[in-house]
Image: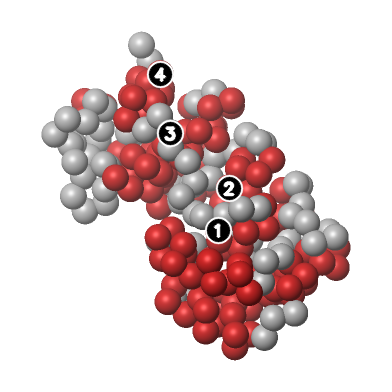
């Protein structure tokens, strides 16, 4: 069995139901939550979005929000000023150019304030079932430890290597499984290696 097949099989056993842990009820809510999640945890984002989405349930409402009101709600997540500016601007663009809806095109998504390639990948995969492999800190760490990527690879290089290494139809599921693996087992500081089924191919364990 190839290493790629072993990784997929092991992750299917460890995390068969891995999914996006950002709470959301619509494409718009997920887009905003992902923008807010930069350099913070999903748990922290989930602590502020219920109030945010109750007050501003769609792009039209958020586009008219006062900056100070949004800042007050999202202050606990860090970088709140820039994030508040971006999600208000983003909402205005959605209303002005996309009828308030989240676009399905990568180029359109990446043109939105606060949206980069990783966020676009998350939206394409989760909202529109477009094969994509978003690379966050967990995905990057796991990819390097499992020798899919090199230590000095940047995010784009890691994404390209993952897309070559695994079948296209598996990218969306594997993205979540890599995150769960990195978040709950293959942690940054204290990875739980004792019963890891992949430790024999792991550069960190070796």
The disc, 2 or 1, on the residue closer to the chain's N-terminal end is 1
Provide the secondary structure element on which disc 2 rests. helix
Give the percent coordinates (x, y) of residue 122.
58, 47
Say whether marks 4 and 1 touch (CB < 8 Å).
Answer: no
The disc, 4 or 3, on the residue closer to the chain's N-terminal end is 4
Provide the secondary structure element on which disc 3 rests. loop
The disc, 4 or 2, on the residue closer to the chain's N-terminal end is 4
Which residue corresponds to the image point at 60% horizontal and 43% vertical from the top-left?
126
Q: Which residue is mark 2?
A: 122
Residue in front for this viewpoint, 197 or 144: 197
Provide the secondary structure element on which disc 4 rests. helix
Q: In this picture, is 1 found above or below 7?
A: above
The disc, 3 or 2, on the residue closer to the chain's N-terminal end is 3
Could you tell me how far apart the alpha carbons at marks 4 and 3 are, in whole angstroms? 18 Å
Check the picture and name the quadrant holding the C terminus.
Answer: top left
Of badges 1 and 3, the one in the foreground is 3
């Amino acid at each position: 069995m190839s290493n790629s097949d072993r990784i997929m099989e092991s992750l299917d056993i460890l995390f068969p139901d891995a999914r996006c842990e950002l709470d959301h009820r619509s494409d718009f809510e997920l887009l905003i939550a992902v923008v807010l999640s930069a350099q913070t945890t999903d748990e922290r984002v989930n602590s502020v979005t219920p109030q945010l989405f109750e007050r501003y349930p769609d792009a039209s409402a958020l586009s008219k929000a006062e900056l100070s009101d949004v800042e007050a709600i999202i202050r606990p997540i860090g970088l709140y000023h820039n994030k508040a500016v971006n999600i208000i601007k983003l909402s205005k663009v959605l209303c002005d150019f996309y009828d308030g809806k989240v676009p399905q095109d990568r180029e359109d998504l990446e043109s939105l304030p606060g949206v980069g390639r990783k966020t676009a990948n998350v939206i394409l995969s989760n909202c529109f079932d477009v094969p994509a492999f978003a690379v966050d800190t967990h995905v990057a760490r796991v990819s390097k430890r499992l020798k899919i990527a090199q230590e000095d690879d940047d995010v784009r290089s890691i994404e390209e290597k993952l897309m070559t290494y695994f079948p296209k139809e598996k990218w969306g599921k594997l993205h979540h499984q890599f995150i769960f693996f990195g978040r709950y087992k293959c942690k940054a500081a204290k990875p739980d290696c004792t019963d890891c089924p992949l430790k024999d191919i792991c550069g960190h364990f070796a």
